[in-house]
Image (cartoon, rainbow, N blue to C red):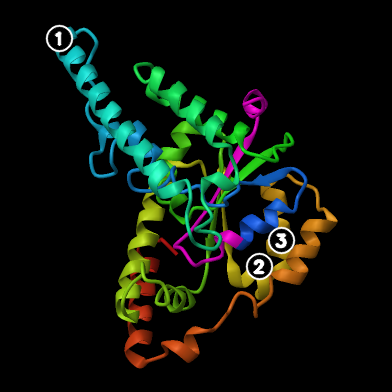
Amino acid sequence: MGNSKRIHSVVPVFIGGTGRSGTTVLGDLLNEHSQVRTSNPTEIKFLANRGGFLDVVFGSMNSQLENREKISIFHYRTYRQRAQKDLLQRRERFEEFSEKLWQKWWQIDAPAPHGPGLHAGIEKQDLQEILNDYSRSIKKNPVRQAKKFMASFMGAQKDHKGEKYWAETTPMNISYSHRLIKLFPEAKFIVIRRDPRDVIASLLTKDWGPNSPLEGVEWIESRLRADHEALKSVPRNQTLFIHLEDLVTNSPQESYNQILSFLQLQDEPAMRSFHTVNMTAENASSGRWRKEIDTPEFGAAIDAMNLRLQRDSII
């Protein structure tokens, strides 16, 4: 695992959104720049997902472990009892996580971005060594050890050439941003949004998505609200909002330049060429909803959702 020591200065760029919003193609775009290495696979999945590594460190999203009342060390017995309980629960979560990693995320029989799994970007022996190191140090400061775990993982991935940024495109990154920022205070977050009607049209083709357009409206609103709440913990200057329609049609040059400026990167021919050739309205399937789910009932539901989100300053 010879690369792990070289990764400590890398800055993570977490790309996310509602899902089906353009996270993958944005990761592909950034990967064309010499100073950015997009993870392989582009979605590692084990970080910002239910039962993932962030849940090992902080507890499940429902437990609110990181927000509970602190106990003074001077209340020694209570402090020690909680510390022992936390350690036991963290061990249990880590064992469940490790099993899930090998069974669910190591090899995935699906096209990108959901596949092919972690094996595409890291040797099994290296990943096992990283897991073993974390297991041996699990008694120590959980956040510090989690940072070490992720630094080792990013450094052990193949094709690492000392780039400034490491990008990852799991859509749930934004909903987990309040936790990610605790591990990576220097991280950048790019929120890519897309016309929710097109998102819903795309989601309806997936067996894991909503079952109807109206259910899709509820699904989208829930995700946007979760993202908005989580981002309150992230400094504003570390967050960039990009709309897919702007990037491919409405204002492509301005949006492209915003990305470069946000990451303090100089333009490069390979990245510009990818943007020009691959990021088109046709490839983005812009407006597909008109042919697939355009009904008065659906339109009314979208309008009502937008009013609620505007009222609450979410969009």
SS type, badge 3: helix
**238 within the magenta span:** no
Residue 79: horizontal and vertical position, in percent? 20, 14
**Does residue 185 show up?**
no
User: Mark 3 packing: few (<14 Cα in 10 Å), some, or many (20+)?
Assistant: some
Identify the amino acid type marked 3: Tyr
Callout 3 touching callout 2 (CB < 8 Å):
yes
Which of the numbered marks, if any, corresponds to residue 247? 2
* First of labels 3, 2 by sequence position: 2
SS type, badge 1: helix
Q: Which residue is disc 1 drawn over?
A: 77
Q: Quadrant of residue 224?
A: bottom left
3D distance between C-alphas at marks 3 and 2: 7 Å
SS type, badge 2: helix
Residue at horizontal 61 percent and vertical 38 percent from the top: 157
User: Mark 2 packing: few (<14 Cα in 10 Å), some, or many (20+)?
Assistant: many
Magenta region, residue range: 1-24
Single out the mark in the foreground, 3 or 1: 1
3D distance between C-alphas at marks 1 and 2: 57 Å
3D distance between C-alphas at marks 3 and 1: 56 Å
Identify the amino acid type marked 2: Leu
Q: Is residue 34 left or right of residue 297?
A: right
Residue 133: horizontal and vertical position, in percent? 46, 21
* First of labels 1, 2 by sequence position: 1
Q: Which residue is disc 3 drawn over?
A: 256
Vertical order, 100 against 216 (above or below)? above
Residue at horizontal 14 percent and vertical 9 percent from the top: 77
Vertical order, 201 against 164 (above or below)? below
Q: Quadrant of residue 297?
A: bottom left
